[in-house]
Image (tube, rainbow, N blue to C red):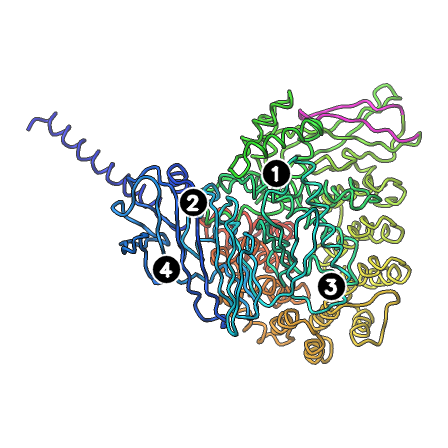
């Protein structure tokens, strides 16, 4: 054999080896755990017209298995490769797979996927009957009720399916439950029957929806209905206080009716689904979940206590509007892949603000928008773990990490800017075309931008790149001169905190308060330095961003900083005060203002502030600054001042919502002996607050905070509080929390170890609250041992928990700590795990940002 022949033979063998390896890797990629983008793309191109006919038999005992059956029908356009279904549980949960002739079908179970061979499929209509035991992970089983929660790709934890958003399907459902349980689902209730032991429910087929939106709820609920525009709305709840329900009922229904009416008018499309049932779930993981026909709400968020604050009432209205808007944005038109999950959330939040505005005609809604969105978004965008609005996603098992304050709160600000660029009418027309074009289909951000571009001459693709596809926010600094001795020339300098020299184009309204009057001017910041000549005045202060539209870190000049810290209440416009507070807050975070000076400015302003939205902001910021920014000695020094101020405002306030707000802040921040004694007097009933009736939740909070402060007989206080509570769910929650509130470190340590068991984290809001008590600033010095094992659990928590739980876990674990040792534990963990999942690394950097800022890296450490 010649040398040339040898070389040809060698390269031929290498090519075969490479080809074999490539095919193995490709198959491995498709069958990896979760749903890879490659698998999803392959299935979406070959599968359509899917129908799931499901039946579940729910036993009364929550530890007994749930037997189930699925009849799956669909069209298959290519039968040359095996059919892959997702079922994220163990192989023994599958009992049999048959075709409709009753013939058994051989299958394989690999990496939580069911593989049906080519020999069992054909091009065209397909039908399979699968008998199985439902997986429990996302069924949220309780002693007296059960609810499903399948977002983002958890339907496959319960039943076999094509668990990706761009294979929409119709669902029909049969449920068998204990006899005294009610049930609801996405479809209309077709028929029901019962005997002495069991109840049977049959629901009609739904409109096409994604698997993450399929839902059913069953349990011991009460049900009430109302009719609006020929549609029956059904409300399921477990609250036992009939007076409380009567106080909330009509407000809840009316806000739903107003939300539906507004959306139908704005979109030009009638409510797109067959019904609107909604369920109030105790201790629900989220604020709400937009399952069409069976929307879930957090019971505590919509069934408000008599002591509810203005923020509580606004948040309820916004939550209801948010979930209702999802029926159009997210449910009817759904993203193709979860990298565009923000596309449904941005419109739910942005539109919700519009829906709520006419419900509260006397409110400053521009201020509401500013305070609702910018602070939460800044809290992420200022960190080294900042993520863009649109993120990368290769597998749906990481989709939960995409959720957070950037998609919920930065994106509405960006959408507000987009509406400003296009004009309100053009923007609305574009959205209407988008909804009509993709009704009951899937779409991407690029699809939306393409349609909106038809209604404007602006280059929206170029504009959206830095705002949507890049992380972080611009940093603006202000300087001014008087070049001719009279006219004021202001220069805004924009820099990129990440050092990439990016420019964020946006309109800003610069405001100058001068000795000769006020002047404002709009500027477009499309380059690094933008200058504006503004009248002839001697400035007292300059605000580079004076309304709700601007976004970024706006660092004030020294003159303006000093003036505003001392004279905030001289600003007559609440929106100006709100904008100024956000700038000062960011400067405090950036150590341009001391935390003590900022705290004093907050206290000074709170003495006179009369705008309730700003009062809410001030007391919230006071709590955060008190616990997370002040040093322990500063906290001790300032506590009497803060407590005195809060009691003064509480006693002088006439509005019940303000009294409640000041009381809640006192409960959270009181640490002096006299202050804590006052909390006990309130809990015991020896002290009353005129004009304010405390709820079970209020008394529970008082008992928990007294225990945190090691108040005498704390154990007896907690046991007495448990006896007082009538609501079963609230009672169970406090019983769960008891070990985390113990004054015995050994008992708390044992409880923390138990949190490693997923069953102990089944009620995620309970677990997060307990972890927060374990790591409260008052206990931080003895809780540092929890940090490392808490971080080591994070990957498992992402795998077993719902979408918000990893962040809730991290915030509860880290927010109470401020020591160099705590910061070093987190930094060392990240250093020792260089291959740690990037999405979770970013979440850690976000949650640890305050801890790292208080303990910056120096040459010594």
Q: Which residue ends up furthest to the right in the rendered image?
A: 516
Q: Which residue is mark 4?
A: 131
Give the SS element for disc 3.
helix
Q: Which residues are magenta?
A: 517-536
Residue 24 rendering spot, x and y as whole percentages: 28, 43
Q: Earlier in the sequence, mark 4 or mark 3?
A: 4
Residue at left 44%, top 45%?
Answer: 395
Q: Is residue 172 visible?
A: yes
Q: Which residue is mark 1?
A: 472
Q: Earlier in the sequence, mark 4 or mark 2?
A: 2
Q: Which residue is mark 2?
A: 50
**Label 1 close to label 2 by CB (< 8 Å):** no
The answer to whether 385 appears left or right of 670 in the picture is: left
Q: Residues within 10 Å of mark 1 (few under 14, many from 20)?
A: many
Q: Label 3 to label 2, Cα distance in Å?
A: 41 Å
**Label 1 close to label 3 by CB (< 8 Å):** no
**Label 1 close to label 4 by CB (< 8 Å):** no
């Amino acid at each position: 054999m010649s040398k040339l022949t040898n070389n040809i033979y060698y390269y031929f063998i290498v090519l075969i080896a490479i080809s074999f390896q490539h095919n193995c890797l490709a198959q491995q990629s498709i069958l990896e755990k979760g749903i890879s983008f490659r698998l999803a793309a392959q299935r979406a191109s070959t599968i359509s017209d899917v129908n799931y006919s499901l039946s579940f038999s729910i036993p009364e005992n929550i530890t007994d298995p749930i037997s189930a059956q699925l009849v799956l029908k669909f069209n298959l356009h290519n039968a040359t490769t095996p059919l892959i279904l997702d079922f994220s549980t163990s192989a023994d949960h599958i009992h049999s797979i048959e075709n409709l002739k009753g013939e058994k079908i051989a299958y394989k179970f690999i990496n939580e996927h069911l593989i049906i061979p080519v020999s069992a499929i054909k091009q065209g209509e397909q039908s399979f009957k699968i008998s199985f035991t439902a997986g429990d992970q996302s069924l949220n089983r309780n002693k007296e009720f059960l609810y499903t929660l399948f977002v983002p790709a958890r339907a496959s934890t319960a039943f076999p399916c094509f668990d990706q958003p761009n294979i929409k399907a119709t669902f029909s459902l049969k449920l068998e439950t204990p006899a005294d349980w009610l049930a609801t689902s996405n479809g209309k209730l077709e028929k029901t029957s019962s005997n002495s032991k069991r109840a049977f429910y049959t629901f009609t087929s739904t409109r096409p929806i994604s698997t993450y939106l399929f839902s059913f709820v069953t349990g011991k609920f009460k049900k009430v209905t109302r009719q609006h525009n020929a549609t029956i709305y059904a409300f399921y709840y477990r609250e036992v206080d009939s007076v409380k329900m009567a106080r909330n009922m009509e407000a809840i229904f009316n806000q739903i009716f107003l939300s539906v009416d507004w959306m139908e008018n704005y979109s030009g499309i009638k409510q797109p689904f067959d019904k609107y049932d909604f369920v109030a779930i105790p201790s629900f993981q989220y604020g709400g979940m937009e399952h069409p026909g069976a929307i879930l709400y957090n019971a505590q968020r919509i069934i408000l206590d008599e002591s509810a604050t203005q923020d509580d009432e606004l948040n309820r209205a916004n939550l209801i509007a948010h979930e209702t808007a999802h029926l159009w944005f997210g449910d009817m038109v759904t993203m193709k892949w979860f990298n565009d999950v923000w596309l449904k959330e941005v419109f739910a939040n942005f539109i919700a603000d519009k829906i709520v505005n006419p419900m509260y005609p006397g409110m400053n809604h521009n201020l509401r928008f500013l305070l609702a969105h910018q602070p939460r978004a800044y809290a992420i965008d200022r960190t080294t773990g900042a993520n863009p609005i649109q993120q990368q996603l290769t597998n749906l098992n990481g989709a939960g990490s995409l959720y957070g304050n950037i998609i919920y709160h930065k994106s509405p600000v960006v959408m507000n800017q987009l509406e400003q660029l296009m004009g309100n009418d053009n923007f609305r027309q574009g959205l209407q075309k988008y909804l009509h074009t993709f009704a009951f289909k899937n779409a991407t951000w690029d699809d939306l931008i393409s349609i909106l571009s038809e209604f404007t001459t602006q280059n929206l693709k170029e504009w959206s790149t830095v705002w949507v596809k890049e992380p972080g926010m611009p940093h603006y600094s202000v300087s001014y001169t008087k070049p001719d001795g009279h006219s004021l020339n202001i220069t805004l300098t924009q820099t990129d905190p990440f050092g990439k020299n990016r420019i964020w184009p946006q309109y800003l309204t610069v405001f100058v308060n001068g000795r000769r009057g006020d002047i404002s001017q709009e500027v477009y910041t499309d380059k690094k330095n933008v200058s504006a000549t503004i009248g002839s005045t001697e400035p007292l202060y300059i605000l580079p961003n004076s309304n709700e539209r601007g976004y970024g870190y706006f660092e004030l000049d020294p003159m303006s900083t000093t003036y505003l810290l001392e004279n905030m209440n001289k600003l007559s416009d609440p929106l100006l005060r709100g904008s100024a507070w956000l700038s000062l807050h960011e400067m405090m975070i950036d150590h341009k203002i001391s935390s003590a000076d900022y705290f004093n400015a907050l206290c000074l302003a709170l003495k006179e502030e009369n705008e309730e939205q700003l009062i809410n902001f001030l007391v919230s910021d006071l709590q955060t600054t008190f616990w997370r920014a002040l040093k322990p000695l500063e906290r001790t020094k300032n506590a009497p001042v803060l407590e005195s101020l809060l009691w003064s405002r509480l006693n002088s306030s006439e509005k019940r919502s303000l009294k409640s707000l000041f009381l809640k802040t006192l409960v959270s921040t009181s640490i002096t002996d006299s202050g804590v004694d006052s909390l006990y007097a309130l809990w015991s009933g020896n002290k009353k607050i005129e004009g304010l009736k405390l709820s079970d939740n209020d008394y529970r909070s008082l008992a928990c905070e007294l225990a945190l402060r090691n108040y005498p007989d704390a154990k007896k206080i907690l046991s007495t509080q448990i006896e007082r509570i009538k609501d079963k769910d609230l009672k169970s929650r406090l019983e769960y929390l008891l070990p985390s509130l113990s004054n015995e470190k050994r008992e708390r340590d044992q409880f923390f170890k138990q949190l490693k068991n997923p069953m102990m984290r089944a009620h995620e809001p309970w677990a997060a609250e307990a972890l927060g008590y374990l790591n409260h600033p008052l206990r931080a010095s003895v809780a540092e041992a929890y940090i490392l094992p808490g971080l080591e659990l994070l990957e498992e928590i992402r795998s077993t928990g719902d979408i918000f739980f990893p962040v809730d876990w991290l915030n509860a674990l880290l927010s109470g700590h401020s020591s160099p040792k705590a910061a070093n534990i987190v930094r060392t963990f990240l250093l020792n795990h260089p291959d740690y999942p990037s999405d979770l690394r970013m979440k850690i950097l976000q949650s640890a940002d305050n801890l790292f800022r208080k303990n910056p890296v120096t040459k010594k450490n």
